[in-house]
Amino acid sequence: MSAAGAGAGAGARVVAAVDLGATSGRVMIGRVGAGLLELEQVARFPNGPVERADGWHWDVEGLWGHVRAGLAEALRREPGIASVGIDSWAVDYGLLGPDGLLAEPFHYRDGRTARGVDAVHAVVPFEQLYRRNGLQFLPFNTLYQYAADPRLADAGTSLLVPDLLAERLTGRRVAERTNASTTGLLDVRTGEWDHALAEVLGIPDRVLPPLVDPGETIGRAPADLGAVPVIAVGSHDTASAIVAVPLSTPNAAYISCGTWGLVGLELAGPIVTDAARAANFTNEGGVDGRVRFLHNVTGLWLLSETVRAWSERDGVPVDLAALLVAAAAEPTPVRLFDADDPSLSLPGDMPGRIAALLGVAAPGVGDRPAFARVIVESIAEAFARSVRTAGLLAEREVDVIHLVGGGALNTLLCQATANRSGRVVLAGPVEATALGNVLVQARALGAFGAGASLEDMRRRVSEAFPPRRFHPHP
């Protein structure tokens, strides 16, 4: 049912999913039909920040070239592709004028956003912002970036990254609602642009494009890419990932784990209490009007940056799989660090910064497995803490945790999360984001019949991709 490359049978819907993460991007073919739910990767390419004279940016032109090439290859393999959907990370944007992009989009880890925070909070204190937009405080949320961006005055509109690529394909400038909810400029209760907030912050109304919902057709790709419809999906990658989380009980929590760990619950409405604000929980838009009530935890970025630093020092790549096997043989560490410490947010000497938090010397080569174990256990502790807090704030007794994304492959992390939370962890699917992207497109094309719900699609996911189960150990 989930074997890639088996080909689509009669009546199956075949779609292309562009899935962009903060470190890599993919183009996938998805096939959905009776007894069929599968993914085939047709292109994978690197992605990441590039340093320019004025700070950290995204190479959006290089990204666009990879996306075009990937879609061309997908159409070569499957000429019957019926639509395309795009998802990516949140908050970062491109400013456009009449002739296109004004400049490369900044990267959310660029340090300029600090002055944007001060500028925004001087006008609207965070307590008021939270009641209006429901977002946890993250210094790179879009409204803070706008406040630090003098180019905004020259822009005709602003598009988040997946909307920017959709505009390249269709020529239409719109904002998909789940990703727009991460800007800080969407009303948390109505799901519409908060024009009054934008005005008081000096953000021109013209830069806020019309909103579209997941499942709506944005436009058509150019003829050389098949002239297929481009369908809005949950274009915030976490929104797509949560579509494919096979939530097994009404009180299940989820962790969408990759560069970041998004830890929380799916709710029918927002929670904007003082307690939720103090706990730094966010209320972001989900597919079908659901609310993603979650906390952003620094995820596998801590491990990948550490391994990158060691690889650069050694002059040869560090074998991550072997490192994790060795780490699992180490004793459970007594001392951990705060995975959300602000000092860990920027690229650089991650081992040195973690060692400073622990109050120890930077690890030597022989100490690396134990150090990696500390990193994994610290991430797991942050996950467990966020699950407990989510349950308290929502007045739910969380009974199981679904962990999806790349972190589902990390056995040590899954077991540590079960141990530290005291809850069973169900790991998988790994490709939740691409699956959610595919499922929303397929539903829009009629693959599930009239009135299909998220729960209907999630049952298909659990049948096609049975999760691995991790029971808590003392």
Image (spheres, helix red, strand yellow):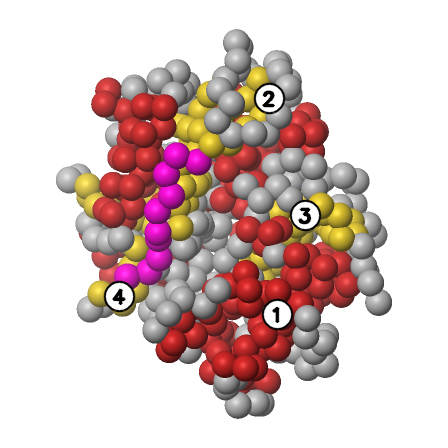
Mark 3 / mark 4, whichever is N-terminal: 4
Q: Please state which of residues 355 and 252 is positioned toward the viewer in this rendering.
A: 355
Which secondary structure is most common in the magenta stretch? Answer: strand
Residue 27 in the image: state x and y as whole percent. 39, 36
The amino acid beneath tag 1 is Ala
Identify residue for label 1.
326
> Disc 4 versus disc 2: distance between alpha carbons?
43 Å
At 48% from the left and 50% from the top, the residue drawn is 182
Return the residue at label 2.
Answer: 36
What amino acid is labelled 3 in the image? Answer: Ala
In the rendered image, residue 441, in percent from the top left (x then y), is placed at: 49, 25
Q: CA distance from mark 2 to mark 1?
A: 38 Å
- Distance between the alpha carbons at the discs numbered 2 and 3: 21 Å
Mark 4 secondary-structure assignment: strand
Identify the element where label 2 is drawn. strand
Pick out the residue farthest to the top.
Answer: 10
Residue indicated by mark 4: 51
